[in-house]
Image (cartoon, rainbow, N blue to C red):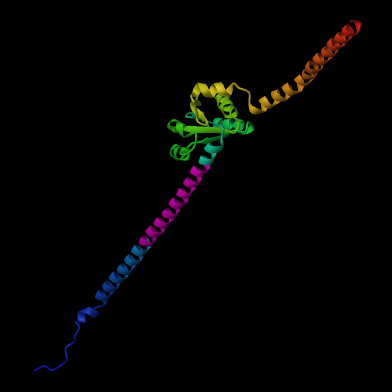
Amino acid sequence: MDFRRKPLISSNLFDPKLARVAGGQARSAAIGHLVAAYVTGGKDRKVTRLSGERQVERAEKRELVSTMNEVFQEANVVVVAHYAGLTVAELTALRGKARVAGVSVKVAKNRLVKLALQGTESAHIADLFTGPTIVAYSSDPVAAPKVVSDFAKTNDKLVILGGAMGKTNLDPNGVKALATLPSLDELRGKLVGLLQAPATRIATVVSAPAAQLARVFGAYAKKDEAA
């Protein structure tokens, strides 16, 4: 009977070739785990970044809606127009003319503008915001209609859709009619002129009857003395 201890592990496992193969497989597996971990981590980082960007975007949208809501509450007139076909240079020129006249012009994000209109007196113009639209507004009820109408006269790509003056709905003709009126500054100038010019007339009108009455009373006095 052979009492020599038999190896518990086959000597084949210590074959150098097999060891190299096993080592290569182990390294491949380790590299695979590292790659998987990197890819998974990259996805997680990408998801985190996208989540952060979405949160910033939502915050910006809320701020825009809040800002435009204040605009619609405070502006005395709002004009809406399509601007499809306008070049960047033309749109910049419109904004420049508007700025000089105290008018603000913004490219409208229709869905957000409709949200901003809620609860304001101009809510009735929400249906105008379809397609590529701009919104012009001003505290002077004539300034925005005048700027937009004057620009549309020389550029047919700017199409006036309508607007609002508080609760009053303005169709395109209403906007154009407002544009023909004098601005507040022009009205102030005319009012000052009217107040200054009639001052001499008022003095004349007031003093003239007084002199006439004095003469009448004097005539009656002389008549009484003669009697």
Q: Residue furthest top?
A: 227
What type of secondary structure mainly makes up the magenta span? helix
Q: As rendered, which of 70 and 227 lies closer to the eye?
A: 227
Identified at 44% across, 54% down, the residue is: 52
Residue 222 sits in quarter: top right
Q: Residue furthest left?
A: 1
Residue 208 sits in quarter: top right
Give percent across and percent down for residue 86: 51, 29
Question: Which span is picked out in magenta?
Answer: 39-67
Give percent across and percent down for residue 165: 53, 29
- Is the residue 59 above or below the residue 205 in the image? below
Please check the rendered image and state whether residue 60 is part of the magenta-colored stretch, yes or no.
yes
Identified at 26% across, 73% down, the residue is: 22
Q: Quadrant of the C terminus?
A: top right
Q: Is residue 72 visible?
A: yes
Q: Quadrant of the N terminus?
A: bottom left
- Is the residue 52 above or below the residue 183 in the image? below
Decide if residue 133 is on the left or right side of residue 37.
right
Identified at 44% across, 33% down, the residue is: 126
Q: As rendered, which of 14 and 137 lies closer to the eye?
A: 137
Please check the rendered image and state whether residue 43 is part of the magenta-colored stretch, yes or no.
yes
Decide if residue 100 is on the left or right side of residue 80.
right
Residue 89 sits in quarter: top right
Give percent across and percent down for residue 73: 53, 38
Q: Is residue 86 visible?
A: no
How many numbered tags mark residues here?
0
Q: Residue furthest right?
A: 226
